[in-house]
């Protein structure tokens, strides 16, 4: 069975973009692969953040992951900072990869532009830590979107460089491209993001209000701008949010209804959004109850993270032991 690694930053409660872009896929992957899912809090501290909120962000995220179907009995689920071998291996890798390679990564430039007041070294070297996250578990595959491909290439380059110089330890991981188109926020302009305030939080599916909060958010979602009035024809392919979401939650028959209705002005956007809300609420049936049960039992999150860290460390220490040997570092005879 192949090993798959994926990480997610502890942003707190999840939103629909996180779910469609990653978590829904993670849940399915558990049936076919040995999955390693890591909440990457060390990556999160490269950004400006409020320390008092970090523990709550981690807890909320783990609650959501469990409520959505991540099964800690089948998959490894743990917190990055609980396994110090991640940063140890990143240090080793930072001696294998050249500065010029990191300087060419466009994500550093993008991220620095977003926080010009805090361009720290961690922001520059975080792709090295990301490579360590993956290679510590000798993962053969990493599910990613198109915008993350360059990080997988870097992990492959690092594995190749280390193996070439010191002897083979690491596999060259493959990118598993997820085919979801970029999900825009309800503003119809930028990628869905909590910080931009254009997101649909998953908590709306547990609001116990007959979908009122969800429908209110969808009512604000930007649609095909050719449909100025109910009588104007449009096209779901030009409808930046609703058209994309229907493809994720509706049946082929319903998609045909949307297409015909939209292109002939046979349905209005209100009808179309109403159908989408109905399908979304059906998709998330049971999520709210599972989430509430976990929130009522905070010990469960601690238990899951402790068990995950223990299992992850056992693997991580084995890999790091191999690395130490290849590097020729001195160890007492009894140590790995
Ligand atoms: Fe978008 Fe639906 Fe309106 Fe067409 S009918 S523009 S797909 S919301």
Image (tube, grey):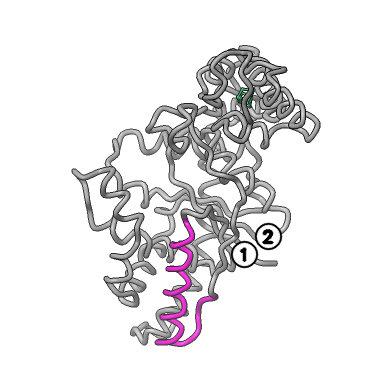
Kindly identify the residue that appears in the image at 46 percent across and 68 percent down: 153
Kindly identify the residue that appears in the image at 65 percent across and 13 percent down: 210
For residue 255, above or below residue 124: above
Q: How many marks?
A: 2
Q: Which mark is residue 33?
A: 2
Q: Which mark is residue 124?
A: none
In which quadrant is the C terminus drawn?
bottom left
x and y percentages locating residue 286 in the rendered image: 69, 27
For residue 248, above or below residue 307: above
Q: Quadrant of ligand 1?
A: top right
Mark 2 surroundings: few (<14), some (14-19) or many (≥20) residues within 10 A: some
Judging by the rendered image, the residue that carries numbered circle 1 is 3
Q: Secondary structure at mark 2?
A: loop
Q: 270 or 3: which is nearer to us?
A: 270
Extent of the magenta region: 148-171
Marks 1/2: CA distance? 6 Å
Indicate whether residue 85 is drawn in magenta: no
Whether label 1 touches label 2, CB < 8 Å: yes
For residue 40, above or below residue 190: below
User: Residue 67 appears in which quarter of the rendering?
Assistant: top right
Q: Secondary structure at mark 1?
A: strand
């Amino acid at each position: 069975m192949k090993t798959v690694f994926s990480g997610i930053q502890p942003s707190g409660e999840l939103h629909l973009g996180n779910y469609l872009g990653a978590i829904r896929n993670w849940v399915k992957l558990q049936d076919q692969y040995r999955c390693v899912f890591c909440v990457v809090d060390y990556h999160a501290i490269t950004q400006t953040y409020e320390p008092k909120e970090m523990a709550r962000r981690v807890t909320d995220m783990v609650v959501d992951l469990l409520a959505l179907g991540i099964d800690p009995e089948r998959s490894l689920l743990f917190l990055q900072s609980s396994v110090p071998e991640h940063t140890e291996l990143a240090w080793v890798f930072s001696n294998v990869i050249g500065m010029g390679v990191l300087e060419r990564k466009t994500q550093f430039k993008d991220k620095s532009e977003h926080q010009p007041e805090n361009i720290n070294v961690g922001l520059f070297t975080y792709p090295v830590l990301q490579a360590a996250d993956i290679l510590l578990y000798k993962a053969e595959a990493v599910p990613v979107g198109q915008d993350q491909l360059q990080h997988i290439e870097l992990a492959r380059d690092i594995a190749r460089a280390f193996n070439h110089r010191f002897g083979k330890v690491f596999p060259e991981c493959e990118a598993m491209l997820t085919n979801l188109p970029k999900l825009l926020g309800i503003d119809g302009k930028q990628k869905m993001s909590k910080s931009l305030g254009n997101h649909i939080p998953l908590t709306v599916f547990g609001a116990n209000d007959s979908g009122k909060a969800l429908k209110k958010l969808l009512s604000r979602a930007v649609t095909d701008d050719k449909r100025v009035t109910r009588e104007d024809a449009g096209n779901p392919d030009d409808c930046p949010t609703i058209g994309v979401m229907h493809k994720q939650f509706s049946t082929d028959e319903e998609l045909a209804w949307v297409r015909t209705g939209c292109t002939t002005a046979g349905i209005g956007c209100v009808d179309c959004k109403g159908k989408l809300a109905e399908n979304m609420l059906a998709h998330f049936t049971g999520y709210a109850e599972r989430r509430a049960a976990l929130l009522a039992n905070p010990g469960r999150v601690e238990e899951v993270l402790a068990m995950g860290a223990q299992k992850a460390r056992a693997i991580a220490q084995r890999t790091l032991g191999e690395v130490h040997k290849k590097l020729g570092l001195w160890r007492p005879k009894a140590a790995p």
